[in-house]
Image (cartoon, grey):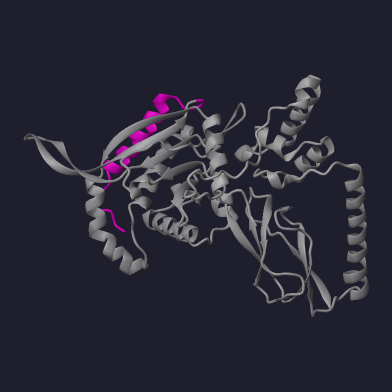
Amino acid sequence: MARFELKLPKMGESVAEATITNWLKQVGDKIEADDAVLEIATDKVDSEVPSEVSGVLVEQLFAKDDLVQVGQTIAIIETDATAESTPASIENTTIPVAVAEIEKSVEVAQAIVAPVVDFKGTEKFLSPLVKNIAKEEGVSAAELESIQGSGKEGRVTKEDILAYVAGRQKAPVANQSTPTIVPSTQAVPVSVNGEDEIVEMDRMRKLISGYMTASLQTSAHVQSFIEVDVTHIVKWRDKVKSIFEKREGEKLTFTPIFMQAVAKALKDFPGMNISVDGNFIIKKKNINLGMATALPNGNLIVPVIKNADQLNLVGMAKAVNDLGNRAKNGKLKPDDTQGGTYTVTNIGSFGSVFGTPIINQPEVGILALGAIRKVPAVIETPEGDFIGIRQKMFLTHSYDHRVVDGALGGMFVKRVADYLEAFDVDTDI
């Protein structure tokens, strides 16, 4: 018998950790290669961890809700393979068991000398370093909820918690006894009439709630609106959509056309393709477009089209369809939601004419696509003006006024509109 270490796989360049949300296999269960052993969640997407080997699950090294770093061993699977270099009794049994006993003893000793801090009461993703500092300093989960993180996605960094601890130590004794904190839990509301249904938010909705609130607290949101004539685009799509579907085996929507126009505008105005980190501006080399996607359960996720400016229209259509389908079927990988530099949301698919979307941090802009409508419009010709029926829509550009002024924000959305109105009806697909 040999012991195989199942490790948390690399999930993308910017993903360093994940939370175990469910064990699909229990100790003693037989496992086939490629069987899903457990479910994990990053701050953006849920996924499964499959086994690379066949065997029997003999150890679970982490429990549900534990935070695990990429590369850490999360389970031990006993296989029929024989270890080649060292006898199994020594390499694969004696040492791991001894190490496990030592680690268990250390945990027991730490539990005796250190106060127990339960992190299950917080929805925040906390690094092991931050957790260790919290344990050593006796910082509760409720206090962690009250700390405004300066890291990516609002995460609490080492500097944040050390500053909090230092401030708490300097505070007057009277204040220490009654700190002002944001409670991490609340009593379940009671239906007054006995007929109202009370449902707790699911994990993703809690995360979305936190992100949206943090974005409004972080960025100075301002909007620019512009109306666009997309008659040429509607006529062109009507002409080629059947040809495209027969040839490619998938539908051609308006979204890839709009995404391509946004990617072109970002190349023209790189000042919109940036992010903010404290007092620093990061100018992004790549144009990675986030595509806000509604999920069947009513939640929202933002998969990212990497290097969107390098895709032709067919490539963009395939990328949009692939990410959209995998998002709705729960098949996105953690890396699929990372690295976005600008986001587009299609509110028109639900009939909205325009809206004021919230910026996806740490980006500085988001574009909302309104519904396409037939409207009467003044048409200018050499023979004079007349009224005609045109296909029009509104674009709403929300941007961060800390780093994007009205001139840049307005010129950018105007450039997107110009590209759409200049769309060539003879474009090949």
Q: Quadrant of residue 355?
A: top left
| Residue 232 versus residue 356 in the image, above or below | below
Which segment did they paint magenta? 402-429
Residue 409 in the image, given as x and y percentages of width and height: 41, 30
The residue lying at 36 percent from left, 68 percent from top is 249
Q: Is residue 400 visible?
A: yes
Q: Quadrant of residue 146?
A: top right
Q: Quadrant of the N terminus?
A: bottom right
The residue lying at 63 percent from left, 47 percent from top is 14
Residue furthest front as drawn? 193
Q: Nearer the viewer, residue 299 or 53?
A: 299
Q: Is 421 a magenta residue?
A: yes
Left or right: residue 154 versus residue 172 is left
Q: Nearer the viewer, residue 185 or 48?
A: 185
Residue furthest top as drawn? 172
Q: Is residue 339 visible?
A: no
The residue lying at 55 percent from left, 40 percent from top is 211
Residue 240 in the image, given as x and y percentages of width and height: 26, 60
Residue 218 in the image, given as x and y percentages of width and height: 56, 30
The residue lying at 75 percent from left, 36 percent from top is 158
Q: Quadrant of the C terminus?
A: bottom left
Q: Is 389 a magenta residue?
A: no
